[in-house]
Structure formats: C-alpha cells, structure tokens
Amino acid sequence: MLYNYQRRDTHEVKVGCIGIGGSNRVVIQSMANTDTNAVEDSAEQAIRIAEAGGELVRFTTQGVREALSLGEIRELIRKKGYSFPVSADVHFNPKAAFEAASTADKVRINPGNFVDAARTFRKLEFTDEEYASEIGKIEETLVPFLRLCKENGTAVRLGVNHGSLSDRIMSRYGDTPAGMVESVMEFLDVCSKEDFSDVVISVKASNTSVMVETVRLLVKRMAENGMTYPLHLGVTEAGDAEDGRIKSAVGIGALLAEGIGDTIRVSLSEPPENEIPVAITLRDHIASREGHPHIQEPSNVLPGASRDRLRKVKGFEDRIVSMHADSPDDIFFLADASMPVKNPEFSGPLVIKSRHINAPAEIMSYIDRFVAAGYTNPIVVSLEYDDKDIDVLRVKAGADFGFLLLNGYASGIEVVDSNFDDAVLADLELGILQATRLRMSKTEYIACPSCGRTLFDLQKTLKEVKEATREMKGLKIGVMGCIVNGPGEMADADYGYVGAGPGHISLYKGKECVVKNIPASEALPRL
C-alpha cells in the first residue's frame, strides 16, 4: 500500500522464543563479528547486542566445528539468563547447515551456493534438460535438510545476496533482480512441496535501488503463488558512520513504508551493537503511522505514474536539487499536500509540504494527482523534523526520502530541522541522494560489516581507505572481509579490497582480481 500504510499479510515463523511475521512487530536483529569458536567472546557480544535491544543474533558457521561451537554459545547464553534466539549463517557448506539444524534456532542458507558450485563468474551454457537436472539436485540436498529442521523445530532463512548468485542462475538471468528472485523461488517450491513453512526470506543488495526492486518483485511472485512467507530486510555492505546509516534507512525504510518487512538488520562496519539503535529508530518511525488518517487515493492514476513526468529545476537539469547545497534562486510556489490540486498558474518549481503523520505518502498522493491533472512543474519535496540527535534525523529523513525517491518522485529535496545548521542539512540531503544513486557527490564505499569469517580488522581498514580516497568524488570502492560476497557484491565498484586469508588481501579493478594474496601491509598503497 503506497498511500495508506498497511503491513503485508504474512504467516508467523517461530524462531526460538520469538515470532517473525504474522501480527508480531518488526523484529530487530544483528550479526556477531567474533570468531564463532571463541565461545565466551561470542556469547558476551551477543548479550551486548541483546541488551541494546536486539532480538536475534546470527553467527557465521562456515564449518561443522563452528556449528558445534554455536551450540555451546547458545547454551552459555541460556546459563547467563538470556533467552534470545541464535541463528547460524552458512555458505558453501551443507554439512555445516545440517549440524546447525540441531544447535541453532534458525539456519540461514544461501540458495546461490548451498547446492550449486561456487561461482566462477564464467558464462555457462545449459540446455533446458541440463538446467532442469541442476534444479533437481536442489531437492536432493534441501529436502533432508528441511526434514531435519522440522524434526528439531528449527526455522530457515533463504538468504540471497546480489553478489552471490550461482553461475547457473547468472547464465540464464544475469546479475539481475529477476535472477535473485528465481534463485529464491526454486528453493521455495521445494519448501512448499515439503509443507515446510518455517521460512523467512531475504534478497539483499548494496545498491538500494536494486534491493528495493528485487524485494518488490519477490513479493509479487509470492503473491501470485499464494505464498505468505515473512521477509528479512537489509542493505548489504552499507558501510559505516553517517553513510551507512543513511543508506540502510533509504533501502529498508522505503520498503517498511510500503508495509513490507517483518525483521530487519542494519549492516554497519562498526561494533554490531551499534546497529540496534538505528534499526529501532527506523522500525518505530514507520510503525508510528499505523492506523493513520486516510490519505486520498487518486482515482485516475496508478501509484508511481509520476515517475519521469516531472521536469527538473531550471539550471539543475543534470541532477536532483539539494535545497541547502544548491540554493536555487528560482521562484518557488508553496503547496500543501492535504489540499486539492490547483493550477499553479506558472511553470516554475513547487515546494510541497505535509503535516500528515505519513507525510511522504500524502505528498506522493498529491504529486500523482498533480501529474494526472496535466501539470509537470518541477517539484521539491520538503519534510520537516524536530530531532536533536543527528543520527535519528539521518534515519528518519533517509527512510522518508528513500520511499519517495526510489519510487521516482521529486525534482529536489529539502530537509528542515531548526536544530541543525544549513551545512549539516546540506550534507544530509546529498547523502540521501547518493544513497539512492540519483546524485554522486563524494566517494562511495561498499563495505561489509565483518563477521567471524573476516581475517583482518575491517573497521580500522575501512577508516584508512576512506582517509586515503575521500577526495575521489564519484569513485566506488569496495572493502570486503572475505570472498563470500566480496567480488560479487562489489560488482559495480571501480576498485575493491577483499580479504584473501590471514593477513593477506586481494585487490580488484571492477570484477577482475588484478593483485592476488598480498600482505595486508602492502594493500592500501597498492590500492
């Protein structure tokens, strides 16, 4: 529902003592970045996440040993008086998933590498018969796993990442939202045949536009097939600091505002407990719209029909305007989104405001009615806040403008908050536009949050990379902890820095690895 907020209907999946989907509020989760075999350290970090407000904690389980250690972590957490569920994160290794089915409350598997061979980024050719045979192999491995999970009361997450599609899927669908959705649907078909419904699904990308498009496509496909599986939302490799918060808010918030999403993880290249306040702010900001006063739904236009119909602001035809950064001097006409559409009597830009609790949706309704009436004036969306915490403002504004901009609305944006000066608000506006990929004003960093697979200090390294490259406006640089998502997730990066082993790094130019397995001490200058 674009105009009037209403959550998508899903069935409940029990994960330990909590429920995801159904009538439950959106669940907040995070992922540990400790070595899973360091049981005491891992349990302590999980407890810090829980005490910050996290409701589920995931651990990397790259092998059987780690899956067994997860059982010890869970037991230690229980002994310390905590009941929150733990999830295993498995890539490439079905044996680890089978073991985790009895040691975790939930097991995440990746359809891109659970059965198919590790990707090589080579174009493979399959006849229809060969392709069908490969799909048959999914059932051979997945069915015993699902039955074991059912026996143990263990939930499953099917987690597809843009950067880890199999060569088989890539060969037929490309590195596309359609390929990501097909990768999930192949596994969901098996789950349906097995009558296994304790499944949560995620389709993630580091590009917010790709992520939102993919989730919407998945929701459509599931609806066509009568499926009500709950969804886990997240923007992968979002980075750290203000950029990471804004990017996560833009992608996750755009979907939550449409009523999509049952559990969220904000991925930051910081201590994982730092993710929780961001996620809570995001969830509660959107949830406050529940039961809001009705917004007029245009009768003669479909939601989103205004995309590409609005002209750009004169003098800024090459970009979306940031009111604080650009300070356009054109004459602006102020419109209230709650009022009927009137002839503006001139062709200049309009500034639209709203006092509705769901202001972005009311503004969207106004713009659709405005365009349906035949007007194409440039429109600047102005949203007003009263937040004294800049991180809270970043999350709220990121979510609100993400909803509008990723749906194709607005020729310009304005964030209004009297608690901050124009320079701070200009940075925020430009950060939002960068997170939507509508305007690049600084270096873009695609950086994973790190986990137990990461073999170098990613947080420290990211800061060093940013310090050395921050003046390279428009350049996209990936900093990835390991090869699980690394080369694929940073596929649209210009350059990449990827962990290759203890103390060693590989460097990429585009998708090509150009320097392999060099000492970490040499990596930054070589980059």
Image: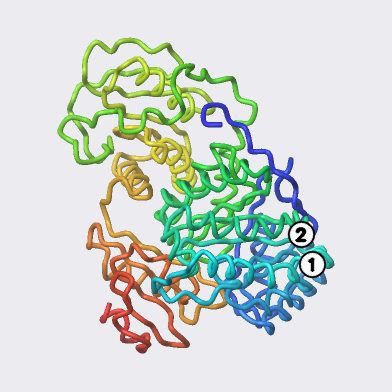
Cα separation, mark 1 vs mark 2, equals: 8 Å
**Rendered image quadrant of residue 475:** bottom left
For the point 43% across and 51% down, which residue is it? 210
Q: Mark 1 or mark 2: which comes first in sequence?
A: 1
For the point 79% across and 62% down, which residue is it? 83
Q: Position of residue 460 (x, y in %)?
A: 42, 74
For mark 2, does the 10 Å Cα neighbourhood hold few (<14), some (14 to 19), or many (20 or more) residues? Answer: some
Q: Is residue 489 left or right of residue 66?
A: left
Q: Position of residue 115 (x, y in %)?
A: 60, 73
Q: Is residue 428 above or below residue 194?
A: above
Q: Is residue 102 left or right of residue 29?
A: right
Q: Residue under label 1, please give it.
A: 147
User: Is disc 1 placed on a helix, strand or loop?
Assistant: helix
Q: Residue under label 2, please give it.
A: 194
Q: Are marks 1 and 2 in contact (CB under 8 Å)?
A: yes
- Position of the N terminus by quadrant: top right
